[in-house]
Image (cartoon, rainbow, N blue to C red):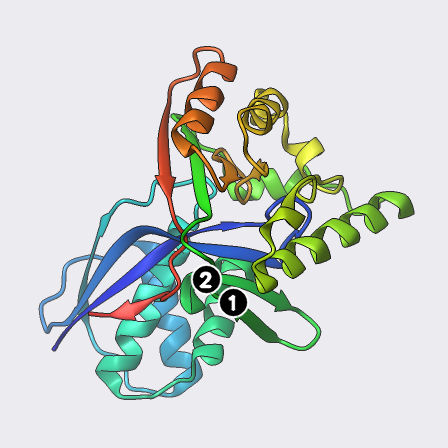
Amino acid sequence: MVVNVQVPASTTNLGPGFDCLGISLQLWNWIKIEANLSPRPIPEMASQAAELFFSRTGQTRFPFTFSIEGEVPQARGLGSSVTLRLGVLMALDRITKTGLAKHEICDLCTELEGHPDNAAAALFGGFTVFSRSTRKVARFDVDPKLHFVLFIPDFEVKTADARQAVPTKFAREDVVDNLGNATMIAAALASGKYEYLQNAFEDRLHQPFREKFVPFLPRVLRAGIEAGALGGFLSGSGSTVACVTLSDPVKVGAALDKAAAGQNAKILIVNADNIGSRIN
C-alpha cells in the first residue's frame, strides 16, 4: 500500500505568540510512504516518528520506504521538520487503519517536535491557537486577501540554538505587552478585522534575543512596515522573516530585499493554506 501526504509549511509565533500561534502557508512538502518488505534506509527523523507511532498505538511494526520532496526549505523557520513528521504519522495511521483523531496526531507530532505551534498549524490549516493547559487547538480560516511576504535567507538557523538563546525569566511589563499583542493578533485573525494587526506583531520575549542569528531583522521589519505591511516578525526561530500585508506584496518584498543590504535570499509571496495536511 502506498500513501501520499501533502503537508503545508507553517509560520509561527507571529511575534508575541511564542509557541502558541501559527498559520499554515500555501507552500508544501509531499511525503510518500510504502509498505515494503525490502525497504531502503530512512532518515532518523522519519524512523523516530514511526517508532513513536507504533509504540503508542500498539500496531505491529512493518518495514516501509520513505521519500519527501517539495518546496519547504530546511531550518528556515517554516516547519520543515513538521512536514516530515506529520507525513509519516498520517501515512502510518492510514496504512494501519488505526483511525487516530487529528488532536491525537497533533499530540504525537508535538512530542517529537518539543513545541506545538508548527504541528497545530500544519495539521489543522488556517490560523491556529494552541493551549498547553487545555491541550486544545482553536483554528480559523484566513482570508486570501491577506498576503504573507517571506524573506528567506540563504543560511540556516538551528531551532535548538535559537531556543537556547531565549531566557527563562522576563520583566512583568514585557510579558504584559506580549499578552496584549498576542491576544490582539488572535482577535484580528479570528474576526477578520485585519486592521487590528497593525503594531500587534511586536515582541519582547524571544525576537530581541534571536537577532544575533538574523542581524538584519530590525531594519527589514521596519522596511516592510514603511512599504505598507501591517507588520512583520521572525518566522519561527528563523532565519525567515515574514511580513503580512493587505496591499502590494511585491512592493513589500522589494523593500525587504533592499533593507537586507545584499543578503542573499529568496522572496516568496504566499497565502494561508486553510486546508492543512491531507492524504492525496
Secondary structure beneath label 1: strand
**Mark 2 or mark 1: whose residue is earlier in sequence:** 2
Secondary structure beneath label 2: loop
Q: Residue at x 38, y 29 (%)?
A: 250
Task: Write down the residue under mark 1.
Answer: 140
Q: Residue 59: which quarter of the image?
A: bottom left
Q: Residue furthest left?
A: 38
Q: Is residue 218 above or below residue 240?
A: above
Residue 192 % position (x, y): 56, 59
In the image, what residue type sits under mark 1? Phe
Out of 249 and 4, give the one closest to the viewer.
Answer: 249
Q: In the image, 77: left or right of 35?
A: right
Residue 15 % position (x, y): 64, 44
Residue 22 % position (x, y): 54, 56
Q: Residue at x 10, y 73 (%)?
A: 37
Residue 9 % position (x, y): 38, 52
In the image, what residue type sits under mark 2? Gly
Q: Residue at x 65, y 53 (%)?
A: 185
Task: Write down the residue under mark 2.
Answer: 126
**Do the residues under discs 2 and 1 have CB atoms within 8 angstroms?**
yes
